[in-house]
Image (tube, helix red, strand yellow):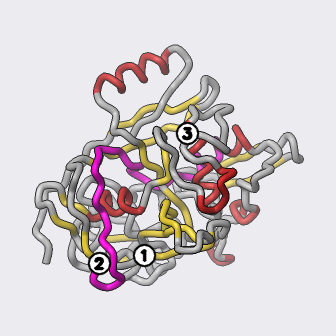
Amino acid sequence: MRAPLIRLSCLLSLLIASPSSAVTMAWTPIGAPGNACDPNTTLGGCYGAVGYNYSIGTYEVTNAQYAEFLNAKAASDPFGLYNFNMSTPDPRLDHQGGITRSGSSGSYTYSVISGRGDMPVNWVSALDALRFANWLNNGQGSGDTETGAYTMSNGPTVTRNAGATIVLASEDEWYKAAYYGASSTSYFDYPTGSDAQPICSTPTAAANRANCSGAVGDLTIKGSYTGSSSPYGTFDQAGNVEEWNEAIYPGGTSRGLRGGAFDCVADCPASPNRGFSGYYNEYNDLGFRVAMIPEPGTGLLVIAGLLGLAGWRRPLA
């Protein structure tokens, strides 16, 4: 049984964007740099050690945020950032999508399906997630998707570039935000601040609940399980969608996955749960969240806010 801890919940928000439209990200600062890793006796390895301050998305990237990305960068969609399954929200078809596309190549436009804008985007590959991170890293708007945080021409084994600011969360960054208790310097077994397996249920303010094992049969709006945040204050790392991370499976053809999903059995969110999938795979239960390095100080936030007033906006957590 791991030592109890006092939850830290510090949410910040800032616009990261172009003058015409902006993706607003909520970020949670993750401190206690230099923490020890968490040995995994089931699978081997040791996870969660991070030697720097950073921030991670409080929520998974949503349909509304991803639709802004598509409207900015996928008028012709040469990289296949959109999957047609996104246009079918019917849970009976195992799609649960949230974005439609209109028009023809060169003038595609994208819209969020009513009521699904704040649900996590799904049907995205690891490559889609890396390109979204590049776009945020490069200031949104017309920001490039092929360079920046990652150089996409390096192929499936692409790794984070030095100096990257907005990134797909690494496995250790994701794991620390989900399980680590800074005050106790120990790890919980589940990303709900608990050593007991979460109960799969419909949205509730009760503690230690998650959207898992078909309890809802669909995705839920971000942060709906208000009493079940991680020790740091992130939400839905135990349910909704499994999340891509930067880990590369030996051989280079697969990327790492962490966390629980709405259609996953109840023990999926356990800390031993570590998955991989082909970097090009797109399914109804796969999504992602981003991280920002370094965690912004107060001075940076003030400067960024002033720049926003001038028509250019930058990131936060």
The residue at the point 85 percent across, 40 percent down is 107
Q: In this orientation, does residue 284 appear?
A: no
Camera-side residue: 15 or 80? 80
Residue that label 1 marks:
274
Q: Residues within 10 Å of mark 1 (few under 14, many from 20)?
A: some
Q: Considering the numbered disc 1 on the image, is that residue within a helix, a strand or a loop? A: loop
Residue range highlighted in magenta: 41-68
In terms of sequence position, does the residue under pointer 1 or pointer 3 come before the other? 3
Q: As shown in the figure, which amino acid type bears the numbered disc 3?
A: Leu
Q: Residues within 10 Å of mark 3 (few under 14, many from 20)?
A: many
Q: How far apart in space, not on screen, are marks 1 and 3 (Cα)?
A: 27 Å
Q: In this orientation, does residue 212 appear?
A: yes
Residue 84: quarter of image: bottom right
Pinpoint residue 106: horizontal percent, then vertical percent: 87, 41
In the figure, 95 relative to 222: above or below?
A: below
In terms of sequence position, does the residue under pointer 3 or pointer 2 come before the other? 2
- Side (left or right) of 291 relative to 284: left
Pinpoint residue 138: horizontal percent, then vertical percent: 58, 34
Residue 23: quarter of image: top right
Q: How far apart in space, not on screen, are marks 3 and 2 (Cα)?
A: 33 Å
Q: As shown in the figure, which amino acid type bears the numbered disc 2?
A: Asn
Residue that label 3 marks:
136
